[in-house]
Image: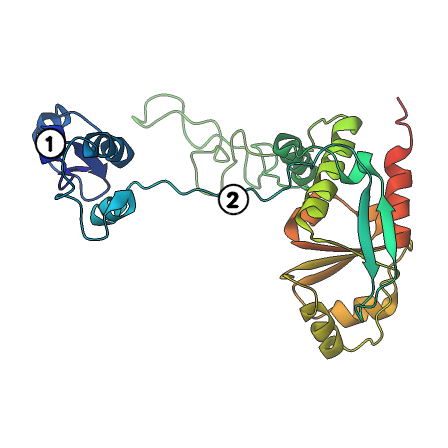
Amino acid sequence: MVIIPAKGAKEWLGFHPWTFCSQERRGRDELQRRRKAPAMSIQAIARAVCSRARLASARWMPEGGGLNGWLSEQKRCMSTVYAKPILATTQGKLKDVEVKVTNFEREDKGIAILAGDIFDVPIRPDIVHRVVRWQLAKRREGNHSTKGISQVRGTGKKPGPQKGSGRARHGSLRGPQFRKGATQHGPKPRSHEIGLQKQVRRLGLKVALSARAAEGKLKVFDNIQPPSHRTRDMEQLIAGIDGCKKVLFVDEAEKVNAPLCQATGNLFYANVLPAKGLNVYSILQHDTLVMSIGAIRRIEERLHTPINR
C-alpha cells in the first residue's frame, strides 16, 4: 500500500490530500509516517474543488474544464460507477404479466397472461441464495469414506516391548502415524442436506421466474417442437433469439420430445427440462428461458397447489 499525493489540489485546499492506491508495499516506518496525513478520496477532493471554484479562477482546471476534466487528470483512480436500473419501477406489484407468444419461426401467436403472484413478485436475492444453497447441498452424494484403525489391513501384533527399547511405545502398526495406517477422524458417508421450508422453496422459484420476466428474457412459445432435428438448424433458430447466450427450454410433457433433445444434444449452451423439473439453479445458469404455454400452465398449477403440512 503506497500513499500518493493527488496532483493539483494543494493550491485549492491548502494542504496535500493523500489518496491510497494498491502498489508494492513499502517500509513500515514510511507508511506510519505518511498515514498521519489527512486521508481524502478523489470524490471529496472534487467536491471541495467545486465549492472553491465559485470564489476563485479556473486556471487550475485542465483544458475542457469542469469536474470530468479534473477527474480525468487524476486518472479517475477512485471515480464512482453509476449503474442504470435494470428492472422497471413497476416490478413486484403482483400484477398479471402480458407476454407475446411466438414460435421458432418468430411468428406472432397472440398474447399470454401470466399469473402476477408467480411472474411478478418482488426480487429477493436472499431467498434465491438460500434455495441455491439448499439445492447444491442436497445433490451432493456424500459417499466420501476413510478407513479407521479397525478397518485398515495389517497385523495386530505389538511392534515392540513396552519398556526397555528406548523407542516410543506403540500397540499397533495400523495407527495413523504409520505409513498405510488409519485415518483419524476422517470423513464418513453422510447426507449434506440442509433444511429449508417448502414455502421458501416456492418463493425462490417465483423470484427466479419474475426476474427473467422483468428482464425480458422469458420467451413464451405456443410449442417448442422444433421444425427440424438437425443441430445446425437449431443453432440458427437460437441465434434468432435476441440477446441469447445460454438458453433453457421447458416443455410441458412428462418427458421432453425426442427431436428437441436430438437437436440440442451437441449444443453446450442449450438444455431441455420438463415442467416438473424446473428449478431455481437451472434458471440462474441460463440467461434466456423459453417455455411453452402448456409448461407455464403446469408451473402455475404446481405453485398454486396448497402446501401439505
| Amino acid beneath label 1 | His
Mark count? 2
Q: Position of residue 292 (x, y in %)?
A: 85, 56
Which of the 4 image quarters holds residue 271? bottom right
Q: Residue at x 84, y 70 (%)?
A: 226
Above-or-below relation of 141 to 293: above
Q: Quadrant of the C terminus?
A: top right
Q: Residue at x 83, y 76 (%)?
A: 228
Q: Is residue 123 left or right of residue 114?
A: left
Above-or-below relation of 151 to 287: above
Mark 2 crowd level (few <14, some 14–19, many ≥20, 10 Å Cα): few
Gap in angstroms between the C-alphas marked 2 and 1? 35 Å
Q: Quadrant of the N terminus?
A: top left
Q: Position of residue 111 (x, y in %)?
A: 86, 54
Tell me the residue that label 2 is attached to. 84
Q: Earlier in the sequence, mark 2 or mark 1?
A: 1
Q: Residue at x 52, y 32 (%)?
A: 157
Q: Nearer the viewer, residue 202 or 134?
A: 202
Tell me the residue that label 1 is attached to. 16
Above-or-below relation of 236 to 142: below
Q: Position of residue 207 (x, y in %)?
A: 71, 37
Q: Residue at x 22, y 33 (%)?
A: 45
